[in-house]
Image: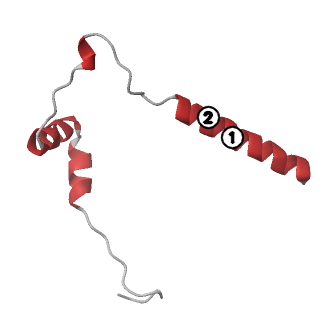
Amino acid sequence: MGQKRIGLFFALLLAALVVLGCGSGTAQTGASAFVPRMTPEERAEAILSRMTLAEKIGQMVMIGVHGTELNDD
């Protein structure tokens, strides 16, 4: 049991290091270093332009569950 925990710990540590190492970072050079700030409306339009119809529909669906027990409602 102890070896499994140690192995799991190192696997999770390795996964965390990979995820943290894959970040985009802040140091950029060249023409892509300067990106003008977009207004909220421009940003929303850019996000919407990349979404599929199914994703847009999914954004409109809200599901709620009332209570803590399963009943006919």
| Residue pictured at 10% horizontal, 38% vertical | 42
For mark 2, what is the residue? 17
Disc 1 secondary structure class: helix
Residue 25, quarter of picture: top left
Q: CA distance from mark 1 to mark 2?
A: 6 Å
Residue 31, quarter of picture: top left
Q: Is residue 18 above or below residue 28?
A: below
Query: Residue 59's x, y, as percent?
Result: 24, 55
Q: Is residue 8 left or right of residue 34?
A: right
| Residue pictured at 38% horizontal, 21% vertical | 27
Q: Is residue 54 left or right of residue 22?
A: left
Query: Residue 28's x, y, as percent?
Result: 35, 18
Q: Is residue 16 left or right of residue 38?
A: right
Residue type at mark 1 is Leu
| Residue pictured at 82% horizontal, 51% vertical | 5
Q: Do residues under tags 1 and 2 come within 8 Å of each other at their CB atoms?
A: yes
